[in-house]
Image (cartoon, grey):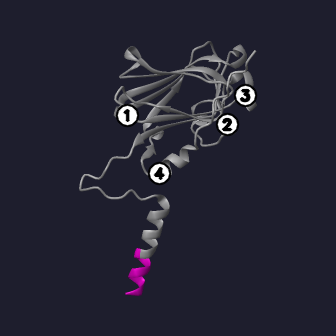
Amino acid sequence: MTTPNKTPPGADPNQLKRTGTVREIGSQAVWSLSSCKPGFGVDQLRDDNLETYWQSDGSQPHLVNIQFRRKTTVKALCIYADYKSDESYTPSKISVRVGNNFHNLQEIRQLELVEPSGWIHVPLTDAHKRPIRTFMIQIAVLANHQNGRDTHMRQIKVFTPVEESSIGKFPRCTTIDFMMHRFISSTFKYVQ
């Protein structure tokens, strides 16, 4: 009997942000869950701490709903899962759906996860590889490893592409570049 390959971890989302091509927009959304154990809800899912997690408390599918106030361009989701820590609570099958509201959600991705340990990158693009525009994203956990009932998700990040400047194309500055420019500019002011 062959063992399925483990889901390879993706890069840390902070590396994506440092490229200057995307920014995290999860704070602009209203988050809700189908269920959760007390003290293991949205706050833990969004607290930037890989030791905390959302834990569902009900029947499958377990749902994470991310709703924006206006139609929003979304390029990718990053989900952190850790099979070594969570075992049967770890998702094995996830569906990602988008739409205007709960009544017209369409599945755009379905993932099979095999003992994931790290960040899972989920591109949210249309048939032409363009980022999607949506009011709502729903992540549905359809199954867990070892037929587990409840699920753990440790973090979820939502990314939008950074738009080019409307007054021309300027090189994107990473945080380090910006800090160097700011330091040189402020030093030059004091020298004059």
Q: Nearer the viewer, residue 61 or 114?
A: 114
**2 and 3 marks in contact (CB < 8 Å):** no
Q: Judging from the image, what secondary structure is the residue with disc 1 in?
A: loop
What amino acid type is highlighted by mark number 2?
A: Thr
Report, in whole angstroms, how far the alpha carbon at label 2 lies from the one at label 4. 27 Å
Query: Percent from the top left, x then y, of residue 111?
Result: 55, 22
**Comparing labels 4 and 3, the label whose residue is closer to the camera:** 4
Q: Magenta segment range?
A: 185-192
**Residue positioned 41% across, 86% down in the render:** 191
Disc 1 target residue: 131
The residue where tag 2 is placed is: 52
- The residue lying furthest to the front in this view is 1
Residue at the image position 36 percent from the left and 35 percent from the top: 73
In the rendered image, residue 186 lying in the magenta stretch gets the answer yes
Mark 3 residue type: Asp
Q: Earlier in the sequence, mark 2 or mark 4?
A: 4
Dot 1 amino acid type? Pro
Tell which circle, 4 or 3, labels the residue nearer the N-terminal end: 4
Residue occupying the far left of the picture:
167
Q: Which is more foreground, mark 2 or mark 4?
A: 4
- Labelled disc at residue 19: 4
**Sequence-earlier tag: 1 or 4:** 4
Mainly helix, strand or loop, the magenta region?
helix
Mark nearest the camera among 1 and 3 is 1
Mark linked to residue 86: 3
